[in-house]
Image (spheres, rainbow, N blue to C red):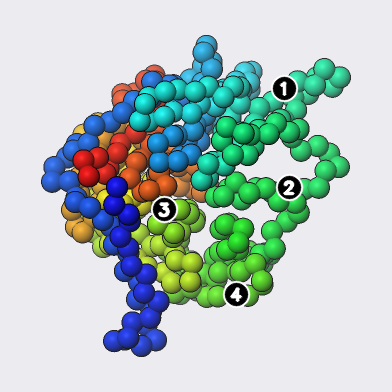
Amino acid sequence: MNTMHYLLCLLSLALPFQPVIAFEFSGPFPDRDYPFPVKESGVEVQVDEATVVESIDDEKVIFSALKPGEPRLQGKGYHADRKDHFAPGRVVVWNTRTDEIKDLGEGKLQCAYRGYVSYYWKLPNPSTGLAESWFSEGRYGTENVIPGYRPGNLPKHQDKFTCETFDGPRTATAPEYWTYQLRVQDGVLAHTLKGKSNPAHNPVIWVRPDGSRQPLAMAWSEMQGAWWEDWAGVYVLRQLVHQNPRSVLPVLHPDGTVQRLPLSPKFASVLSSRLAALTRRGIVLTNDAIWEGALFPNKFTSGIYLVRDGKVARLVDWIVGNEHASFDNTHRGLAVSPDGCKLAFKHTVGERLKAPHTIKMIDLCQGE
């Protein structure tokens, strides 16, 4: 397996004082649609909840699934008023190479990163009748079971990117701004003064853990969150891509440089996307129900697309991922493997509320 080829240049000698970054995808781009086989886990997941799916390593995927007999609709999303059923679910590990399915027990996945996992479940306390949280967390295969947070405990927070749990608040704060969280070691992005509408030219500010503030070369309106793409070492700052042939995907490098990856006019001039991810082969975009009707997507355009260098290849049809992820910056229902090759995703074919949703996988580097 070839290593990722991308070059990071902090300063250009030919153009002093103008940082230049080249982000290069590697390997051949598909010469047709549907170039890769789609592997199926066979494990059903919820329809109306932001299903968490993450990579443990280059072969194993961990995700929240349904227990046998649990309803597909959990009373959230499309049926938010339904509160008569608590479905704890289960946590499943799928080895995409051997197709082995390992059931870790009752609960819901909370986080997974570089082999570290955490998941929780709720059990009723006999003395109070109230459900209490319990956590399993640690390196996959050697997780520790610990009680959940209790009244009187120190407030705990978890880095949603690295799964690190820490006591007390973050060190990087900007109370006068609305912020997006980055990794704990990176700080936060401050993007809008609270109670005010920022003009388009007002920059986003990177607040570091040491308290320093770095204005970024971008306007607040350009970003819609911050998603850490671990294999590439950058933050993707936008999940929504509107129909615009000049659309770009902004990414943020750890040195504070903003790079704008061009999208293909063949995609952006006719389609929109609500989820974006980076793989070694190119930018992954989904065109789905949020634009074309929540219950009855257009089967002729919905699916996953791979975009690179002005080219577009369609990878899979129908409904993909979690439809609300782009707004609340939570789990996308997509997971890229640590090597940037494999794409695991929540998927269904047919009418959203009736068809089973499962976790599937495409190996974009197959055949190397």
Assess disc 4: are there few (<14), some (14-19) or many (≥20) residues with their C-alpha within 10 Å of its C-alpha: some
Q: Is residue 282 above or below residue 142?
A: below
Question: What is the CA distance from the residue labelled 2 to the residue labelled 4?
Answer: 25 Å
For residue 213, the mark is: 4
Q: Amino acid at mark 2?
A: Lys
Q: Amino acid at mark 3?
A: Trp
Q: Nearer the viewer, mark 2 or mark 3?
A: 3
Specify which label sits upstream in the sequence, 2 or 3. 2
Q: Position of residue 286 (x, y in %)?
A: 32, 43
Q: Is residue 244 left or right of residue 42?
A: left
Kindly identify which residue carries mark 1.
123
At 74% across and 24% down in the image, what residue appears? 131
- Looking at the image, do the residues carrying marks 3 and 1 touch, with CB atoms under 8 Å apart? no
Q: Amino acid at mark 4?
A: Arg
- Looking at the image, do the residues carrying marks 1 and 2 touch, with CB atoms under 8 Å apart? no
Q: Position of residue 320 (x, y in %)?
A: 36, 35
Local secondary structure at mark 1: strand
For residue 231, the mark is: 3
